[in-house]
Amino acid sequence: MKTKNIIRIAALGLLGYLMYGCSKQDTEFKSYLNGKEIKYPGTVANAHSRPGNLRAAITWNPSSDPSITRYVVYWNNKADSIIFNSTNHNPSDSLTVVVPNLNEYIYSFTVFSYDAKGNKSIPLDINNVRVYGPIYQSGLSNRGFDVTNPYGISADGKLKLNFLKVDTSTHNVFTEIKYTNKAGQASIGRLSADSLSIVLPDYKADTKIEFRSAFKPVANALDTFYVANYEDFTTINSVSICDKKLFKKVYLPNDARPYEGGTDIDKLWDGSTSPQGYPNIFHSDGNGPLPVVITFDMGAVYKGLVAIEETGRNCCHNPDDFEVWGIADLTNATTNLKANDPGWAAEATAKGWKLLKEIKRTDDGSAPYKVNFDPNPPPVRYIRIRIKHNSNGEGNYTNMSELTFWNNALL
């Protein structure tokens, strides 16, 4: 009997203990929840990052949850954070936080949504966010220029710089060209990554040109990184040979004609570099005594002719006294007098022709002979050579092998 009572008392005690324990745990749980059900605000969507220069951008589509009042981005194991207040609940929009003052490192970020009561969403992690800085910049190098053909100067004096093709893996975005313009002011040109050349129309001759390239570590990076130092472009030789491929024959009234078709004036720009023999020469027809005149089109207006080189025939009838005349436009420029008429020079001047130089040689007239023009020449496209005397005294024919002109339109 005593044993049964003891068992009953123990059972009642255990039941009471269990009822008390469950009641206490329930009370503690409600206290932990503050007597309220847990609420999780909506989570952001499509979170992604863009790297920058010691910073990064985190972008996401906001949640449609209308209770959200702010977002918090954490990094460094939640030791650092940044708050983004927003009441935008349109999931088709994008919100962006730029996180500044980072190190050059690979980061992980966590984004939480918060409502006004402090409830926070399930976290969303954005991992492997690389941040770039001085280490990345130190590995950059300038885009190379074309050392075999670094530049060209057009007939109207515009300077073109030539560069090598970009290595697309480097994400080069442009190359900055620093130069001095004709007004003496510092100027900047920009060569795009998909271009092989850039034209500097106002470059001041004999001044330094420097360049440096700009890159993005990835296509969508926030920032552009420049090579630390400018690099010198090759020295520009501002004097260039006029392009003979542009030269064309012109016949004005009373101009000398060729002895035969194969000895026409286009022989004067066929590229020969030494005295030539018949028929690789210009050979006049001999119709009339010297002086005689020939005319040709240089194909472009040159603003600063610097020099002329004349090469005679390898034997005879070489000019040793001749004049070089120029004009930019042939409109109303035709002369009517023959070149041996005493009034020819006055008529040519009245028609707008300018005497660029009278050249007198003291040799036999065959070797290449270069003469500088006087400073500040006028713009010239059309040239007239008026031959007044031959070195061997022959007074009807005239022979020449080549004419070459230099231009310095950049000055």
Image: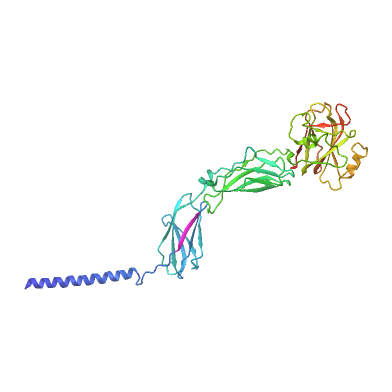
Front residue (pair 177, 26): 177
Residue occupying the point 48% across, 65% down: 62
Front residue (pair 203, 26): 203
Where is residue 9? Give x, y as percent. 13, 72
Which residue, as the protein is rendered here, is positioned at the far right? 342
Quarter occupied by the N terminus = bottom left
Figure check: 308 above or below 51: above
Indicate left or right for 130 with 328 as reference. left
Report the number of discs.
0
Residue occupying the point 83% across, 41% down: 251
User: Magenta stretch?
Assistant: 44-50
Figure check: 136 above or below 268: below
Where is residue 201? Give x, y as percent. 71, 47
Q: Is residue 297 magenta?
A: no
Q: Is residue 49 magenta?
A: yes
Which residue, as the protein is rendered here, is positioned at the far left? 1
Q: Quadrant of residue 278?
A: top right
Q: Answer yes or no: is residue 123 visible.
A: yes
Where is residue 336? Give x, y as percent. 90, 43
Q: Quadrant of residue 271?
A: top right
SS assignment for the magenta stretch, majority: strand
Where is residue 293? Give x, y as percent. 86, 37
Indicate left or right for 12 with 72 as reference. left
